[in-house]
Amino acid sequence: MSATLSDDAQLIAACRRGEARAMEMLYHQFKRRVFGMAHRIVGPNDAEEVAQEVFVRVFRGLAAFRGDSALSTWIYRLTVNASLSYLARRGRRQEVGDETLADVPAAPEVSRDPGLAARIERALAELPPGYRAILVLHDVEGLSHEECAAILECRVGTCKSQLHKARARMRELLGPIGGTPQ
Amino acid sequence: MKCEDVRPKLTAYLDGELEGDRGSAVRGHLRGCEACRTAANDEAALRDGLRALPTLDAPSGMWAKIQTQLADAEIADSEKPGWRRVLARWNPQHWVTPRFALASGAVAVIFCVWAWRFTHRDGGAQVAFQLPRMPTIVTPAPAPAPETSSDDVAAEVAAVPKSTSDSYANAVAELRQLATTSRASWSDSQQKQFDAKVAELEHDIATSEEGRPRHKAYRTLIRYLERAASRDEVAFADTRATP
């Protein structure tokens, strides 16, 4: 943990000095998650634009980053906020048609239902943005409730409650999935 | 345990967050309730499906676009005036903490209390805030009554009007002297009007009853003499109106 903090601190310091190599390293360290979150919250058409905006904010805001939270938490918070703001600017509901879902790569390891990944992506796009954010952070990206709460700036209890509601809404949208009994 | 108790706990149960006998109780209910078991299976499949979604890689040209945007922003920064850069850096959230707000409020309260006390202390500040006034001759306060024995209360009371009249008379004499000095520079008609007016007011004093009526007559004469001594225009309004 301390090694990570130290690495982060060194990386941040180098980025603040404008070292191109450090900036590129930071970009490659977070690009998949930032782009993935943006992709699943705002949709495939606008994900790149939002991800670019996030990284520009990250590099321009590093000078003011005080280290109150982990660098990753701060970057994911910027990503979620930028995505939600983008959706708010664009309109409450995202228009996702079949032609855009066709661009979504299929899940390689879903054995029970090969079409489940596409169905989940489609249902995810139908969710309200807040539910989408918590599902992406917790279930897709695998972050803990504590991390999700820090990113969404809410209580852990609120985070759990939102996750429960989001999953319930997803089940309504998906219908029976047919998993194996627990 | 009933279905309505189990359903809200399914998410926590499936994520392994229910500890001790709470997890056991949910598991026990699921063994006997097909509807809840189906719901749990669906939620577990959904969770697994979400976790199995593929990792998405960023487009290959994104880093170059970000670098271009950063360069554009830095060039725009260099062209901004200095005050706009300072304004852009200013973020009140960093220093407007509850502690800072509390301290600011305390300072404001202390200032208000100080200001209130300053403006209400013996009228001192009120004098300070008054506009400068034309110097006027203040009517002297009544002279203290002659010392009498504490038993002779009636004599003391009777002496008060007399001493007040004496004080007024002294004031009139003093003002009369000042007005006479000014009188030398007046026109003949002004002098005549002044003399006539003073004679009229002195007559009023002489003919008025001792006590309040005489004091009132004295005050009328004193006011007139004050205005005349300071060449107040009001004192000669009638004269100027006369051709």
Image: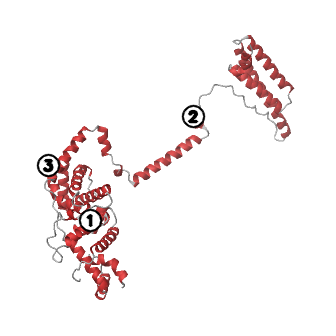
Q: Position of residue A101 (x, y in %)?
A: 20, 65
Q: Please give the residue where the numbered disc 2 appears in the rendered image.
A: B129
Which amino acid does the dot numbered 2 rest on? Answer: Phe
- Number of residues whose C-alpha sits closer than 10 Å to that of mark 2, classed few (under 14), some (14–19) or many (20 or more): few
How far apart are labels 2 and 3 at the CA level?
65 Å
Q: Quadrant of residue B30?
A: bottom left
Q: Secondary structure beneath disc 2?
A: helix
What is the chain identity of the residue bearing mark 2? Answer: B
- Number of residues whose C-alpha sits closer than 10 Å to that of mark 3, classed few (under 14), some (14–19) or many (20 or more): few
**B160 over B12 or under it: above or below:** above
In primary-sequence order, the first of circles 1 and 3 is: 3
Q: Nearer the viewer, mark 2 or mark 1?
A: 1
How far apart are labels 2 and 1 at the CA level?
70 Å
Apparent side of residue B173 relative to residue A171 in the rendered image (left or right): right
**The N terminus of chain B lies in which quarter of the figure?**
bottom left
Q: Please give the residue where the numbered disc 3 appears in the rendered image.
A: A20
Which residue is painted at 33% across and 48% down in the image?
B91
Which residue is painted at 35% across and 83% down in the image?
B3
Label number found at residue A125: 1
What is the chain identity of the residue bearing mark 1? Answer: A
Which amino acid does the dot numbered 1 rest on? Answer: Ala
Which residue is painted at 24% across and 68% down in the image?
A122
Q: Secondary structure beneath disc 3?
A: helix
Q: Quadrant of residue A100?
A: bottom left
Count the marks: 3
Q: Position of residue B22 (x, y in %)?
A: 32, 82
